[in-house]
Image (spheres, grey):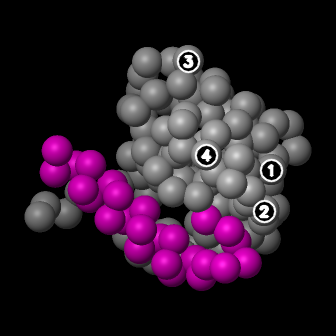
Amino acid sequence: MDNKKYTILVIEDEELLLSAIVRKLQMNGLNVISCKSGQDGIEILTKSEKNPDAIWLDYYLKDMNGLEFMNKLKTNEKWSHIPTIVVSNSASFEKITNMSALGVKKYYLKAENRLEEIIAYIKGLVEEKDKL
């Protein structure tokens, strides 16, 4: 495999958690674009010439929830195929089902998963996507 450096867009409104995620992703050789709101994430996608390789999305943001963000993502053909994972403080069968129907690859509960596990999954996701 070549040494391509993948870019992850992280959307998380808890500042300390965002810093930890960014630091861990960078330590794992990934480029990171971070933002604290769904609208900031949409603006970054709008202004970027190249899509990120994946999106790390907190479900509960101050300005919108994950469902609203995914609906916006899916309305734009350029963004609709970006692999997205959700990392949230809560989950229900309905929430996970709705997010999966919108294309979310994986739904993680923050309390039940370590950052290292989530990062290993997202790295595998972008590397696998790159092989296609």
In the figure, 6 relative to 38: above or below?
Answer: below
In the figure, 75 relative to 45: above or below?
Answer: above
Q: Nearer the viewer, residue 49 or 91?
A: 91
Sort mark 1 into few (<14), some (14-19) or many (20+) by Cα contacts within 10 Å. some
Q: Which secondary structure lies at badge 3?
A: loop
Q: Position of residue 46 (x, y in %)?
A: 56, 23
Q: Nearer the viewer, residue 7 or 98?
A: 98
Which of the two discs, 1 and 4, labels the residue nearer the N terminus? 1
Q: Quadrant of the C terminus?
A: top left
How much space separates mark 3 and mark 2, taking CA atoms?
26 Å
Cβ atoms under marks 1 and 2 closer than 8 Å: yes
- Specify the amino acid type for callout 3: Thr
On whether residue 89 falls in the magenta region, the answer is no
Q: Which mark is residue 90?
A: 2
Sort mark 2 into few (<14), some (14-19) or many (20+) by Cα contacts within 10 Å. some
Q: Is residue 54 left or right of residue 43?
A: left
How much space separates mark 1 and mark 2, taking CA atoms?
9 Å
Q: Which mark is residue 60?
A: 1
Task: Report if residue 64 is visible in the image.
Answer: yes
Report the residue marked by disc 4: 97
Which of the two discs, 4 and 3, labels the residue nearer the N terminus? 3
Residue at the image point whose x is 39% and y is 46% from the top: 53
